[in-house]
Amino acid sequence: MRLQKKPEPDDGMSDYYLACLTPADADRLKPLEELVRLAFWGEENYRRFLEELPEYFGCKAVRITGRNRDELIGFLLARALYESLELLKLGVFPQWQRRGVGTQLIETAFSEGLRRGCSRCFLEVRKSNENAIQFYYGHGFRIAGTRIHYYTDPVEDAWVMEKELA
Ligand SMILES: CC(C)(COP(=O)(O)OP(=O)(O)OC[C@H]1O[C@@H](n2cnc3c(N)ncnc32)[C@H](O)[C@@H]1OP(=O)(O)O)[C@@H](O)C(=O)NCCC(=O)NCCS
């Protein structure tokens, strides 16, 4: 996976980098997912996706702290199946949003999807999640359909959004 850091003037994020999501990251996804209201799928499942199932991959944005473990600021999980790249999870800690981190994560996923032979990308998003929908519009997605009662807690329909990759 090709990873790059966006060059930015010093805005307090100068010490962060992008890297592959690994099974060792599974334990730190829960706090982020709870905070940004993504459905946590369980540490064991994340480990299995990243360890045993080669169609899954992920990337993370990490801030260098100088302590034992760098701080996770965002992550993305995706699955590449034949021509389709499915974006399964994308989240950035609120204090790091609107600084281009989500864009770098999604662009990394597009590159990896293309490298794996995918020609289209799709995802589901809660119909009420205006912020994410704006973000995805900005990255060339369009609404392709609806999945009725796709989400639980609370129950809600999803938009299916898609874009051509190639
Ligand atoms: C969606 C999300 C990943 C975007 O991450 P991010 O790092 O803030 O995104 P970026 O800074 O790269 O934003 C790029 C552009 O997307 C659009 N955008 C992003 N967040 C937006 C918001 N809250 N409202 C309106 N537009 C937004 C803007 O056009 C933005 O460009 P700008 O900041 O120059 O105006 C982040 O808001 C998030 O984690 N949300 C909670 C979890 C979630 O909903 N995930 C998606 C589930 S399907």
Image (cartoon, grey):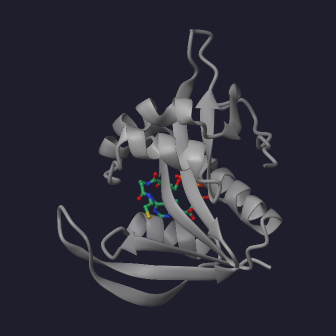
Can residue 97 be seen?
no
How far from the left and from the top, in percent, is residue 157? 28, 79
Q: Quadrant of residue 166?
A: bottom right
Horizontal side of residue 56 vs 5, given as left or right: left
Q: Quadrant of residue 163?
A: bottom right
How far from the left and from the top, in percent, is residue 118? 73, 74
Horizontal side of residue 31 vs 95, given as left or right: left
Q: Residue furthest left?
A: 154
Tell me the residue at 32%/54% (across/down). Answer: 39
Q: Quadrant of residue 60?
A: top right
How far from the left and from the top, in percent, is residue 94? 42, 43
Tell me the residue at 77%/40% (across/down). Answer: 5
Question: How many marks on residues?
Answer: 0
How far from the left and from the top, in percent, is residue 76? 56, 51
Viewer-proximal residue among 1 and 15: 1
Relative to 134, is 30 above or below?
Answer: above
Tell me the residue at 43%/38% (across/down). Answer: 29
Tell me the residue at 80%/43% (across/down). Answer: 4
Viewer-proximal residue among 3 and 54: 54
Viewer-proximal residue among 25 and 104: 25
Can residue 116 be seen?
yes
Relative to 152, is 144 above or below?
Answer: below
Q: Residue furthest bottom?
A: 145
Q: Residue furthest front?
A: 52
